[in-house]
């Protein structure tokens, strides 16, 4: 059995992630969507919510499971008995980062392979950062994320706006 590990922050999960996962699961016996707990990024959603959104996105596929992790990716792979790390490439600039990351992971764990899948053309512009910025500026991301993620984003923005309004000094 060959198990693959697809790590990321998934903040939020979008159709680009889903595209890579659905294509990767055709190559392996099982795919683990691994939601990283401590990325060096500003996160919109806590890990539990990111995991729940990913679980809902893949609920239809028994070969995909979702988990969280907070250690080195190669260590999490070993804990999950995964032999392969799956990554997605959207644009040429992604290649340099992913190439360096694959080399570092190989240095740490020679027994774990890395593969990169090139996203379909219609998803090349989608990133979690782009999705978040569009939502925060009240744009429509319904073509970029599943309906349940779109709703979660709208609710989160409304919650943030409500909290900001509560913190505005009054005369």
Image (cartoon, rainbow, N blue to C red):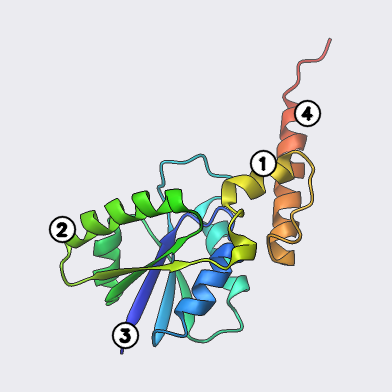
Quarter placement of the C terminus: top right
The span from disc 2 to disc 3 (Cα, nearest Å) is 21 Å
Q: Which mark is residue 165?
A: 4
Q: Earlier in the sequence, mark 2 or mark 3?
A: 3
Is residue 14 visible from the viewing direction of this image?
A: no
**Are circles 2 and 3 on residues that touch, CB within 8 Å?**
no
Q: Nearer the viewer, mark 4 or mark 1?
A: 1
Instruction: From this view, report whether residue 79 is shown above or below residue 61.
Output: above
Q: Nearer the viewer, mark 3 or mark 4?
A: 3
Where is residue 164? Give x, y as percent. 72, 29
Report whether 170 appears left or right of 65. Answer: right
Circle 4: element type? helix
Query: In this figure, which residue is indicated by the disc labeled 1?
Result: 133
Q: Which mark is residue 107?
A: 2
Report whether 76 appears left or right of 157. Answer: left
Q: Nearer the viewer, mark 4 or mark 2?
A: 2
Where is residue 46? Give x, y as percent. 54, 50
Q: Earlier in the sequence, mark 4 or mark 1?
A: 1
**Are circles 4 and 2 on residues that touch, CB within 8 Å?**
no
Circle 2: element type? helix
Look at 50% across and 73% down and name the residue there.
21
Query: In this figure, which residue is indicated by the disc labeled 3?
Result: 2
Where is residue 19? Give x, y as percent. 56, 71
The span from disc 2 to disc 1 (Cα, nearest Å) is 36 Å
Instruction: From this view, report whether residue 116 is shown above or below residue 28.
Output: above
């Amino acid at each position: 059995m060959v198990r693959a590990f697809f790590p990321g922050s998934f903040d939020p999960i979008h159709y680009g992630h889903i595209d890579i996962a659905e294509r990767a699961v055709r190559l392996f016996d099982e795919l683990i969507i691994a939601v990283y707990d401590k990325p060096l990024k500003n996160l919109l959603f806590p890990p539990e919510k990111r995991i729940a959104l990913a679980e809902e996105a893949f609920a239809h596929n028994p070969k995909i499971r979702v988990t969280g992790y907070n250690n080195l990716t190669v260590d999490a792979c070993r804990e999950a008995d995964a032999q392969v790390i799956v990554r997605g490439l959207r644009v040429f600039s992604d290649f340099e980062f992913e190439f360096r990351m694959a080399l570092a992971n190989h240095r740490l764990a020679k027994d774990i392979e890395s593969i990169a899948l090139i996203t379909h053309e219609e998803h090349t512009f989608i990133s979690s950062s782009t999705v978040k910025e569009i939502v925060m500026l009240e744009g429509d991301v319904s073509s970029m994320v599943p309906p349940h993620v779109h709703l979660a984003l709208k609710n989160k923005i409304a919650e943030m706006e409500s909290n900001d309004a509560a913190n505005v000094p009054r005369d």
